[in-house]
Image (spheres, helix red, strand yellow):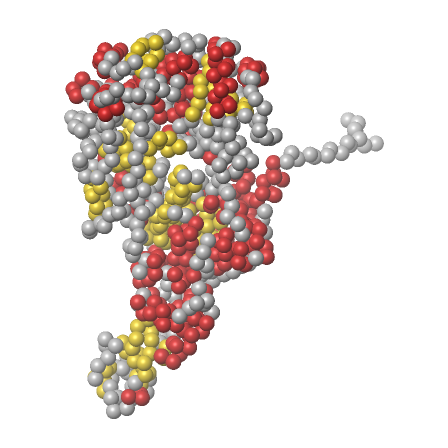
Amino acid sequence: MQISSFLWGGTYNPIIPFHRRLDRKNRFFMGAKNAREVFDGYLQAYDPDFVVRLGSTKELDVDLGSYREIEAEEILSGISEDGTPRYGVGLFEILNHLLAEEFRFVRRDKVTFDIPDVADSLLWTSIFGGLPSSLQSDSENYLKRFPDYQRVACGNDSYLDHFRSENHFLRRLTNLDIECRVRAFRDDWIYLMDGSSVEDIVFYWNLRALGWRILPVPLAARNLDKVRAFVEQFVEDNYWPYRNNPSMFNHTTLLKAPSVDEKDHEAFANSLNLKPAKQDGFGKLTRQPWIPRVWSEWDRRRNGGGRGEISVERREVRLAPVENRFYLAPLLPKFAAEFSRHCTPRCANELEPRVYGETGLHAEAIPQGGDDLVRAVGGYILRDLRCSADGPVLLVDHRRFEHRLDLPEAEPIFKAWFKERGWSVELSDNGYIVKHVLKQFGGLWGTNWLTEECVIQLLHEIASKKWLTAETFRSLIHKAANQIQFADVDRLTKWLVDAKIIKLGVELQCPQCRQRSWYSIADSDYELRCGQCLEDFALPTESPKEIRWAYRGHGAFTSRHGTQGGLAVILTLRLFKGHSLDQVTPMLSFNATKGGPKMEVDLALHTRRIRGGFPEQGVIFAECKSYNEFTRADIEKMESFAQQFPGAAMVFSTLRRELTPSEVSMLARVAKRGWRTRLKGDAFSPLVILTGNELFSSTEPWNTWRQLGGRYERFAHWPYHEDEIEGLAEATQYLYLAFDSHDYVNRQRRPRVVAATKQPRRSKGGPK
């Protein structure tokens, strides 16, 4: 706590407990399989840049995964050299800035520096902050230069006096300029705890590290009139109507620490003299007898236990990369010292890469990972870059040092991510074909026409013919254009030509074998060779009517099997990239192995989207078909592969508008298994069905269903859902599998009553 009290933003440094065994009677650990799961869940919840071992954990063999470790003694070791810590920005830099900028002249507003004397009290140190004894004298020299500075006593009857908004104690000083947005629905909390319990204090520290605005109330102070009056005013001040919905009100939650008895919790709530609420059903104070299981991802998402967003400055930089490389100037707080001798990270810059107009497949959603992933992203110095749960993080050590980064390619990112999980992946033959087709279109930006089913049929027609005469080609173009609203024949033709889907040539008849052949413009000459009989013949210039203009498919469209189902893969990628999700990192069809048989997956996606103002990442694996059916082997393969990556979504995508009865039966069983897994509290893989209804659309699925009407009307409005993929799974399972997940989950939760029929007792000798 003393180290964090000295560091800028140290309030948000969690204290992660390491349990060797779990107390199964403790509700906080409900659902945990073992102590390791709880520890890993804590790391995932707070996602620290560095991990510092303290106490007995220094002697233990603890696997930290991809998280980097530093020694506690290293952090403050540089202060004696230049007044700055070896890691982070320190208190002395903040005080220097305030003295130079904020207190150069006499201030008219009231600002006090009543620093509580916390001594060796763990409770008061956690609330107000405290410094190591080695820094006491130096900090005193700085603070004496501020007006209205004084050391004040701290006790149960006086600690709330120091919470005045104009007062700046240590912890408030080290939060200078920091803004925190929380994910919780309730922003205001009161924490009733036992001030002598280490467990209660650690919980308070960690809940505040999430970004919560939380008021601590020790049990020993709960009956004091001054404390009760302060709490009552805190509740009243935080009762106000929401701006977007005045019929709903913000309220305060009274949270009970683990050591506090339920009777004391209830008695303290009843002792508060609050004014009547303005609206029935929206009370000012809510009692909560349990602490959110921060270690559980399921609980974090549903009970508001997610980590808040800590930020000071935002900047959007538009970069034009040279040779897929760009240089980025870092951001540091204005009060950070200009020079530091340590060459170690001072603050973190979160990067949110977005790529526009590129024809290749670049990585926008960077998953969490270790050094292999950092190398794939393009970190030339590993210590300068970290792949966090929110995306790439640049660890900055100097204000003027520009960082060189490469424009990350999607395929290396996915390979590194798989490698860190023990998998070896390579593009399959189909993957190379799809990659070539996408390049032929000019990237996803050139696939707008594919959302029209008649264009897909036109492409199949072009690929199935050796060539098309100009007249036949024009009739096919007109037929397709007539089925598209506001379509233009010339624009469609230009797209086919620009994308090199077709090439113009001439159709000629060989005078020797009487067979017709096609010759491109580039190959046409006055002397030609027949492709059938291999005889040379002259171009019939004397009879131009025998020279007929003709079009022929080019590249992957020279044969009906050239795309190998690649159009379904591209349309699936387009749907997630263009509408449903903000940022996507794709990997096209690939083979994956991990000590067993090779498994082919048509499409994998890392996704990153902003939900409620916060980034959320996910993984999707897709099985794509053009017009063929999904087989049992396809479904079992996908389900088996997705189980290796808990929480990854499964997508079955087809260009057909409906599924066959056998497909519905097989996929419905997979969906039921998934929801049963979720009911157990385990990570499950949502099952999404995509058909031509969604793929052949230039808008989001919800808008498509509104246009279709009928049974689709039920999902015609954008759902407020915890997870967009989960919402898409619920909708498509209902539409295409006739499976209502809500009804199924509710039936599974109901207690099953089995009526026992009373049987007549039989004698030991059996029936007479």
Is residue 522 visible to us here? yes
Give the percent coordinates (x, y) of residue 714.
57, 51
Is residue 370 visible to us here? no
User: In which image quadrant can residue 98 be found?
Assistant: top left
Give the percent coordinates (x, y) of residue 473.
38, 76
Give the percent coordinates (x, y) of residue 258.
49, 18
- Residue at 47% over, 69% down: 483
Looking at the image, the residue that sits furthest to the right is: 768
Q: Quadrant of the C terminus?
A: top right
Q: Is residue 330 left or right of residue 682?
A: left
User: In which image quadrant can residue 267 be found?
Assistant: top right
Q: Is residue 448 left or right of residue 338?
A: right
Location of residue 142 with respect to 590 vertically, above or below: above
Location of residue 193 with respect to 248 vertically, above or below: above
Give the percent coordinates (x, y) of residue 353.
30, 45
- Asked whether 736 or 135 is in front, the reply is 135
Looking at the image, the residue that sits furthest to the front is: 108
- Asked whether 525 or 386 is in front, the reply is 386
- Asked whether 701 or 369 is in front, the reply is 701
Location of residue 529 with respect to 307 vertically, above or below: below
- Asked whether 58 or 546 is in front, the reply is 546
Q: Quadrant of the N terminus?
A: top left
- Residue at 47% over, 45% down: 724
- Residue at 30% over, 11% down: 150
- Residue at 46% over, 72% down: 482
Looking at the image, the residue that sits furthest to the bottom is: 542
